[in-house]
Amino acid sequence: MGCATSVVAAEDAPASSEFVKPDSWEAFVAYSKQGGDFGTWKSRGKTVKIWEGIPGGLDYTLTFTISLAHDGKAILQTHFMATSTGQVISTGSGVNYWDAESKSVKSSYSGFDQGQLFTGHSTLVGIDKKNRIIKWHYTETSRGKTTEYFQTAQQIGNNRRLQTAQKVSGG
């Protein structure tokens, strides 16, 4: 399945929303299924200088895949971002799961930005069902620097998503 996604910086982020955490893993998976989030997403664009290991101004193509795993108890994600000449800008993978202790969806993610390892973890802030937006608080360590971000993914139509990333402070 080929679906389109746009990745933008904070200045293009959706207006403020009301986010509510799902009360179970099953509710989170149901929201993801209902919204058509599973499958392969493709995008083209120009990088923005927000991530520690990725310079701004590079033209890219991005493939992002989301799938259920482990009998529906986890969601796997992978991404591959490259220039038109095939230079790998970023690649990585992660897993979303239900943390019973905190009663929230958490995620771990790692990969390589321009050949250098990055690692990260997220906690779901919540879902705004009315505006079809999901929001995460993401902490990433890359090149010896740790940065916190808010990331959103908005369902803007059938087979279309708008993803945003914004530094929690200083950006």
Image (tube, rainbow, N blue to C red):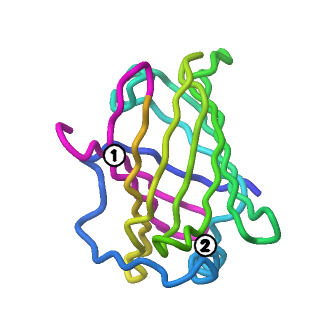
Q: Say which amino acid is labelled 1.
A: Tyr
The residue positioned 55% from the left and 55% from the top of the image is 107
Quadrant location of the N terminus in the rendered image: bottom right
Residue 122, image x, y percentages? 46, 53
**Dot 1 corresponds to which residue?**
149
In this view, 61 is above or below 5: above
In this view, 76 is above or below 119: below
Residue 141, image x, y percentages? 43, 31
Q: Which mark is residue 11?
A: none
Residue 98, image x, y percentages? 59, 69
Q: Residues within 10 Å of mark 1 (few under 14, many from 20)?
A: many
Residue 3, image x, y percentages? 65, 56
Alpha carbon separation for disc pair 1 and 2? 21 Å
Q: Say which amino acid is labelled 2.
A: Ser
Which secondary structure lies at badge 2?
A: helix
Residue 147 is one of the magenta-drawn residues? yes
Q: Residue furthest left?
A: 170
The residue positioned 66% from the left and 75% from the top of the image is 33
Is 112 or 101 nearer to us in this picture? 101
The residue positioned 56% from the left and 48% from the top of the image is 108
Quadrant location of the C terminus in the rendered image: top left
Residue 148 is one of the magenta-drawn residues? yes
Is 27 or 63 nearer to us in this picture? 27
Residues in magenta?
142-171
**Dot 2 corresponds to which residue?**
32
On the image, which quarter does residue 147 sit in?
top left
Q: Residue furthest front?
A: 101
